Amino acid sequence: MIYEAVKVLKASGVRFLISPYEADSQVAFLVRSGQVDFAVSEDSDLVCFACPRIAFKVKLDSTCEYLDTPKWTKSLEKRKELKNESLRVFWS
């Protein structure tokens, strides 16, 4: 899946970085500093680094979970809209 994603990104002219090791803190910094729009990860480790926008659990059919942290941390009412119970409990 990574090889295919890299191929599509290159063909589309999209700039991207590939880390050879764990890069959660660097990725979170790139998102927080506005250098990139969001992070893509296979797990939720980026939450620990205060990454504001994360797409994770990406599937071959291009579906994924998307977490927009600022949206859910602004108000209690917004948190009630979360469909995922684990995330609802986490943000409360």
Image: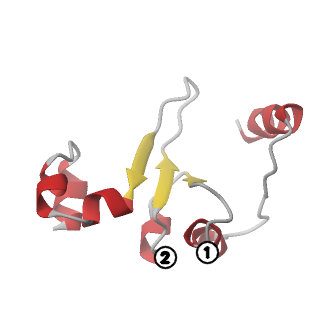
Residue 53: x, y in percent?
48, 57
**Label 1 amino acid?**
Phe
**Label 2 amino acid?**
Phe
Q: Where, quadrant-wise, is the N terminus in this rendering?
A: top right
In the rendered view, would you say 85 is above or below 36? above
Q: Dot 2, how many residues are within 10 Å of its Cα: few (below 14), some (14-19), or many (20+)? A: some
Question: Which residue is drawn at the image coordinates 49% and 48% (left, top)?
Answer: 56
In the rendered view, would you say 15 is above or below 24? above
- Extreme-top residue of the structure: 61
Looking at the image, residue 16 sits to the left or right of residue 63; the answer is right
Question: Which residue is drawn at the image coordinates 60% and 70% (left, top)?
Answer: 24
Looking at the image, residue 74 sits to the left or right of residue 40; the answer is left
Q: Could you tell me if the residues under marks 1 and 2 are in contact, i.e. CB atoms within 8 Å?
A: yes
Residue 25: x, y in percent?
60, 76
Q: Closer to the camera, 48 or 35?
A: 35
Find numbered disc 1 in the image and state the secondary structure of the residue it sits on: helix
Residue 2: x, y in percent?
73, 41
Residue 13: x, y in percent?
86, 39
Find numbered disc 2 in the image and state the secondary structure of the residue it sits on: helix
Q: Which residue is mark 1?
A: 29
Q: Closer to the camera, 40 or 81?
A: 81
Q: Closer to the camera, 3 or 71?
A: 71
Q: Where, quadrant-wise, is the C terminus in this rendering?
A: bottom left
Looking at the image, residue 12 sits to the left or right of residue 81; the answer is right
Looking at the image, residue 50 sits to the left or right of residue 17; the answer is left
Q: Dot 1, how many residues are within 10 Å of its Cα: few (below 14), some (14-19), or many (20+)? A: some
Identify the mark at residue 49; answer none if there is no mark.
Answer: 2
Q: Quadrant of residue 71?
A: bottom left
